[in-house]
Amino acid sequence: MVPIYAVLVDYNKPLEESPSYQALRRQKDIVTIVCDNSTQVELDQNLVQKDGNVYLSMHGNRGLSKAYNRALDHIEEEDPVLEGFVMLFDDDTDIPDSYFDCVRKAIKENDADIYLPLITDERPDLGYLSPSILKDVYMHRTMDPWSLTKEEICGINSGMVIRLSLFADYRYNEDLFLDHVDHDFIRSMRKRNAKIRIIDTELHQHFSAFETNGNKAIARFTILKKDMREFYKPTFKGRLFCEYVLLRRKAIIFYYTRDMRIWFR
């Protein structure tokens, strides 16, 4: 049987309240690795181990890429051959049992390196959150993910299924803390000609309303700015586009918070 792992990065959400973990704990053939990035909530390590899963403390919020790499290092220690597949999840994704059935079927067919489920959020009118389009520097949603070409397909982390052998000589870019970790990975794998396929199952990703607290919005923007500049730094066109997007994001933050400090960040 092909090994299947799941990596769940938790940030300040008790596992009892995490829809992702509650869905994963029902899948007894999947080893779930909980990477604890929490700073305010103490996760129940005993619960994870009682469920037959793996708990890894990141000793604070070390960022998404470092959490993924820590989990991958653990998997490689257990299985140096890196056989099988790994699924990635946020702590707030609704995962129906039908998703796991679809993943098992895809793995059995074994015709791709990366599988992307359909992801919706609170704005279905804007198109799917994932798969999405990454073409040159432009990144946006699509209403018709099935029409995406291999040169433009992209997607978010949560629900992504990845052949472990891809990580034999690859780790996530730890200069990216949170944003664009997934897009950077897909961009790298497209350059390696990894085969990406959409699987016909749907997940729902929860996103809170836009932050109206100026302090929180500015703190979040600071992370976004650093990550975007890292992601777009390879090309001059990318760097220009990045500054345009950041300026637009500042305007949105000011609209919601009326906090003038954002213009000086």
Image (spheres, rainbow, N blue to C red):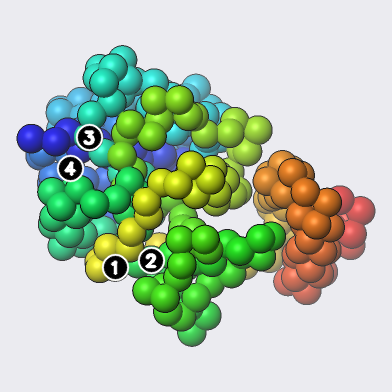
Q: CA distance from mark 4 to mark 3?
A: 19 Å
234 above or below 44? below
Residue 119's label in the rendered image is 2
Q: Nearer the viewer, residue 19 or 153?
A: 153
Circles 2 and 3: CB distance less than 8 Å?
no
- CA neighbours of label 2 inside 10 A, class few (<14), some (14 to 19), many (20+): many
Q: Nearer the viewer, residue 147 or 156?
A: 147
Q: Position of residue 150 (x, y in %)?
A: 46, 61
Circles 4 and 3: CB distance less than 8 Å?
no
* Of marks 2 and 4, the one in the foreground: 2
Q: Quadrant of the N terminus?
A: top left
**SS at mark 3?**
loop
N-terminal of the pair, mark 4 or mark 1, is 4
The residue at the far right in this view is: 264
**Amino acid type indicated by mark 1:** Glu
**SS at mark 1?**
strand
N-terminal of the pair, mark 2 or mark 1, is 2
**Amino acid type indicated by mark 4:** Arg
**SS at mark 4?**
loop
**SS at mark 2?**
strand
Q: CA distance from mark 2 to mark 4?
A: 21 Å
**Amino acid type indicated by mark 2:** Ile
Q: Position of residue 33 (x, y in %)?
A: 30, 32
Circles 2 and 1: CB distance less than 8 Å?
yes
Q: Residue at x 59, y 69 (%)?
A: 140
Name the residue that disc number 4 marks: 25
